[in-house]
Image (cartoon, rainbow, N blue to C red):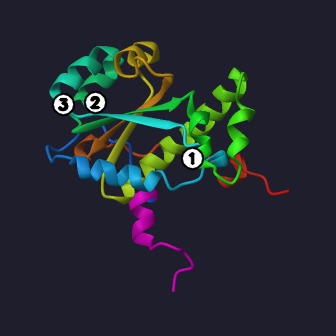
Amino acid sequence: MSDHAVSDAALDTIFREAHTQNKWTDKPVSPALLMAVYDLMRLAPTAANTSPARIVFVTSDEAKARLKPILAEGNREKTMTAPAIALIGHDLDFYEHLPKLFPNNPKMKDNFAGKPELIQTVAFRNGSLQGAYFILAARALGLDCGPMSGFNNDALDKEFFAGTNIKSNFICAVGHGDPAGVFPRNPRLSFDEACKIV
């Protein structure tokens, strides 16, 4: 019997056999499946349940046309052919939701008022965590992911987050990957190279 909380097959799906995707099949991704990914990722922890991540799912031809010129040239084709593209950002007004999200301390919101550096740090850190949770949730539900950072953040914010205090972090194309577009896995650092037990 395995000591793992999930099966080896699940670990393969989420980590060991999963690769960044660059090519996609034409199998669609339904809104219900995108909602299911979010419903999983939102359960994972953030500091004081701040939950600053905000996502715009680009799926229509019209929205893709708006996104295309914002992408770095090398990212355009592999992004435009994905059935869905998650624009993952973080809301700098996240603390306004803390009375709801952290009810055991309703005054937590007050800790952020007038502190832009703290707001930016907490929003970016926890929004990045949630972006990683998004990838794991998508893989767990049978989707492949193509995360990337090659785009113009300011242009994306103006185009897709206008009128908000949301700032883009990274983009993640999602769908069903074509194995022909997968590159061999690059080397990773060993435990001894990256970790220390003290």
| Amino acid, disc 2 | Thr
Vertical comparison of 156 with 54: above or below: above
Judged left or right of residue 144, residue 166 is right
Q: Decide which of 175, 57 is in the foreground and name it.
A: 57
- The answer to whether the residues at label 3 and label 2 have Cβ atoms under 8 Å apart is no
Judged by depth in the image, the label closer to the viewer, 2 or 1, is: 1
Tell me the quadrant of the picture where the C terminus can be found.
bottom right
Q: Decide which of 152, 51 is in the foreground and name it.
A: 51
Secondary structure at numbered mark 1: helix
| Amino acid, disc 1 | Lys
Determine which residue is flagged by label 3.
60
Secondary structure at numbered mark 3: loop
Q: Quadrant of residue 118?
A: top right
Q: Position of residue 104 (x, y in %)?
A: 69, 54
Determine which residue is flagged by label 1.
100
Q: Position of residue 173 (x, y in %)?
A: 32, 37
Q: Quadrant of residue 8?
A: bottom left
Judged by depth in the image, the label closer to the viewer, 3 or 2, is: 3
Which comes sooner in the sequence, label 1 or label 3? Answer: 3
Q: Quadrant of residue 150?
A: top left
Secondary structure at numbered mark 2: helix
Residue 185 appears in view: yes
Q: Decide which of 80, 22 is in the foreground and name it.
A: 80
Magenta stretch holds residue 10: yes
Which comes sooner in the sequence, label 3 or label 2? Answer: 3
- The residue sitting at 74% across, 34% down in the picture is 111
- Please give the range of residues in magenta: 1-15
Which comes sooner in the sequence, label 2 or label 1? Answer: 2
Judged left or right of residue 46, residue 134 is left
Determine which residue is flagged by label 2.
79
Q: Position of residue 32 (x, y in %)?
A: 25, 52
